[in-house]
Amino acid sequence: MHVAMISADGGARPLAEALHQLGHQVSLYADATDLPSDDPPDVVHAFAGLADAVAYREKTGAPVVATPAALAAGGVPAADVDRIVAPTAVGVPALLQAGAVRTQIQVVPPGIDVDFFQPGPDGPGSRTPDRPARVLCVAGPGGAGLADAVGALRRVPGAQLIVEGINPSATPGRVHWLGDVPLERRPALFRSVDVFLGTAPAGMTPVEAMACGTPVIAYAQGEVADQVAHGVTGTLVEPGDVASLAVALRDLLDFEPRRYAYGAAGVSRVRARHAWPLVAEQIEAVYQSVVSLTEPDSASA
């Protein structure tokens, strides 16, 4: 199968490489206007440039698969695309409200490199009693979520809060700011802490933490509510409930067997849901479903 991907920032490259490993020809384009006018691909996967991709379908018949982000930015009615690949079930109601029908939507978890994000050779790390507990969080834009993380930390004696992001203001002494952490250092960072604390939307960061054997305590909001299995790979609490956040932190940090069990379960969950080869197989099935709709009916030939 020949797949054309529209990805302005190149973010689709890992998926393209995983599909190539399955034997597909994948071409990456920064702009849909660069798609070939002759010999069109079997399917167009639009991460951006959706309006032009839909116009291309009208000319060539190549079916279009879109991401929710491309749909939101493209100004194109949901009915004009063949499939929408949602990264979590959390966003499905919004897609339905936007005019999509359930049969258009396929939920496929996003992928990560589980050979890069992985625990140490001995599995999830364990904390010795002689060092303070280390809790990692990511500060959202303008320090979003930071006040709640600091508030929870104040109720956990001795724990240190490590924050990735830009320091917007002065913070207590038990808060250590890292600034922006480059990709190559992120697995080691996750392995060096005891818990990832999610008080602000953090994209794939909770998944990366779990892949490295680090349990997650987070507000049950947005995609993290789908990423974290409550009571299995971490703990989810109601957004804004700082007291419950602190209780969850204390309970997990005070009981090493549970913290280790959550870490090990997180590694298994990520490998079963987010490894690129598995994600590519699910995306392949989406492509096959739309390609089959455009092929001549062999039974009537």
Image: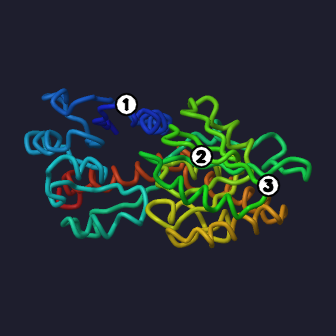
Q: Measuring 84% from the left and 61% from the top, which residue is drawn there?
A: 256
Q: Relative to 90, does residue 278 appear above or below in the rendering?
A: above
Q: Distance between the residues labelled 3 and 1?
A: 43 Å
Secondary element under disc 1, as helix, strand or loop, is: loop
Quadrant in the rendering for residue 9: top left
Question: Which mark lies nearer to you, 3 or 1?
Answer: 3
Q: How far apart are marks 2 and 1 (CA)?
A: 36 Å
Q: Relative to 278, does residue 247 appear above or below in the rendering?
A: below
Q: Nearer the viewer, residue 224 or 89?
A: 224
Q: Residues within 10 Å of mark 2 (few under 14, many from 20)?
A: few
Residue 117 screen position, x and y as percent: 64, 40
Q: What residue type is labelled 3?
A: Gly
Q: What residue type is labelled 1?
A: Gly
Quarter of the figure that contains the C terminus: bottom left
- Name the mark on residue 158: 3
- Name the mark on residue 178: none
- Whichever of labels 3 and 1 marks the residue nearer the N terminus, that label is 1
Q: Relative to 68, does residue 18 appear above or below in the rendering?
A: above
- State the residue position of label 1: 10
The residue lying furthest to the left in this view is 59
Question: Which mark lies nearer to you, 2 or 1?
Answer: 2
Secondary element under disc 2, as helix, strand or loop, is: loop
- State the residue position of label 2: 171
**CB-based contact (under 8 Å), mark 2 and mark 1:** no
